Image (cartoon, rainbow, N blue to C red):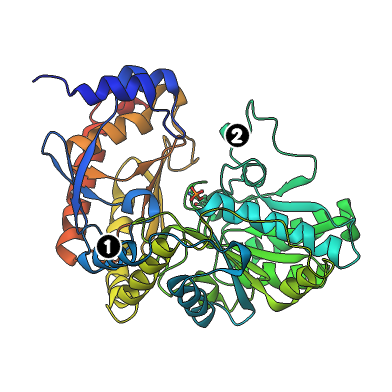
Amino acid sequence: MPTNPLVALDRDHLIHPVVNYRAHEQRGVTILESGHGAYLRDTQGTELLDAFSGLWCVNVGYGQQSVVQAAAEQMAKLPYATGYFHYGSEPAIRLAARLVELAPASLRHVYFTLGGSDANDSAIRFITHYYNSTGRPQKKHFISIERGYHGSSSQSAGLTALAVFHQNFDLPLPSQHKIPSPYPYRNPAGSDADAIIRASVAALRAKVQELGRDNVAAFFCEPIQGSGGVIVPPKGWLKAMGDACRELDILFVVDEVITGFGRTGPMFACEAEGAEPDLMMLAKGLTAGYAPMGAVLMSDRVYQGIADGVAPGVPVGHGYTYSAHPVSAAIGLEVLRLYTEGGLLANGIAQAPLFEQGLRDLLEHPLVGDARSRGLLGALELVADKSTKARFDPALKLHERIADAAYRNQVIFRAFGDNVLGFAPALCYTQADFELLFARLKKTLDEVLDQPDVYRAA
Ligand code: PMP
């Protein structure tokens, strides 16, 4: 079969996010060409079941014509309107108002970004401005969680706690600190929910005490850690962390970039937990990947502090050319309609038990040590020894073999380096899609187990 000329062009010119550049040059790009519902098609004509919603974002599935139409209409009418100089556009205003309606009651104001990294970066800038504006300029330290992910822009990557985002990038900054992950499968405090929550609260208190509470600005967390390996803390954990932040007089900042928009069941994970953040970051499911957009939602207290922190006529110097982009906003409005009136949130909730059961059934497989999920966000953790939870030797490169075998079996999910397999099926999945997913997944795991060195290790 002749090689697609795009592969050489890609190798020579296009730098990919978060790949090993040398490995990519050797391996070449896999070009995806089209999508429909939960399925993708590559340039070889292979149809693949997407169990990761692109990159945890295409929550409404591919090919939703009403979204395409909303974008086309807005492009034809007004493709761009700046938010600078007091200008704006109808879809952006309506989307901000709708998000406030749906979000926890503590959040009243919305700043639109282009994605999740710059939403986290914007939050850091707003918080810094807020404390400078309200007479507490020494509150400059930020605490986040090991295995957390908050983006890869220059400040958000320091809150991220995954080594490759720091290596050779001179991060984290001296003002960025971490506490241990609540990781139930591997928590030194054991698997008891109360013990895990107590350990996290104690770690936050200890870190704030070590830094001095007058020096700490905020605590950032994900309700479920995504890129760190789909780590699902016990119910009550998020609320307890929020309560601790109040008591410690630091801002409680929740990153719902993955967990937002029905991914864990309700519109936002905060809702199920009764958590009331001071700031909340959104992206991904906001436009379901049909165009780039993110957002920072903030409380009235933070907004008023910033607004009063500048002299009359002096702007708050934070903005992007594409903040509140009208086409992205029009897409966001239609995507929100699909979640609510379109029934996708309800479908996600209805399908979640099938997903949970399918993952749990795989606990019987010799490779699988842990199965965890909430809503339609889940993971399997593969171990070499179930009794000791020992990981496979990284030299086996098991995650790469699994990703390759999965592709051959026409299913896409995320195989993380430490052999956690992450799943984030679209909210439009049907029972038949789940049956196919678990059949293909089981076949993939069996094939990998059949490889002699893996069999010996397991
Ligand atoms: N926060 C979280 C929780 C994320 O999962 C991500 C992306 N995976 C980001 C922030 C960064 O978002 P983006 O890639 O859109 O910049």
**Depicted 106 relative to depicted 329: above or below:** below
Task: Give the x, y percent position of residue 188.
Answer: 64, 50
Can you say whether 225 is above or below 167 in the image?
below
Residue 83 marker: none
Q: Disc number at residue 72?
A: 1
Residue 94 in the image: above or below residue 443: below
Give SS at disc 1.
Answer: helix
- Asked if one can make out residue 458 in the rendered structure from this viewpoint, the answer is no
Dot 2, crowdedness within 10 Å: few (<14), some or many (≥20)? some
Q: Residues within 10 Å of mark 1 (few under 14, many from 20)?
A: some
Which mark, residue 163?
Answer: 2
Query: Is 323 or 222 nearer to us in this picture?
Result: 323
Q: Answer with mark 2 or mark 1, whichever residue precedes in sequence.
A: 1
Q: CA distance from mark 2 to mark 1?
A: 41 Å
State the quadrant of the C terminus: top left
Q: Image quadrant for the N terminus?
A: top left
Q: Secondary structure at mark 2?
A: helix
Q: Residue at x 34, y 79 (%)?
A: 340
Q: Quadrant of residue 361?
A: bottom left
Q: Amino acid at mark 2?
A: Ala
Residue at the spot 40% in from the left edge and 72% down from the top edge: 265
The answer to whether marks 2 and 1 mark residues whose Cβ atoms lie closer than 8 Å is: no
42 relative position to 192: left or right: left
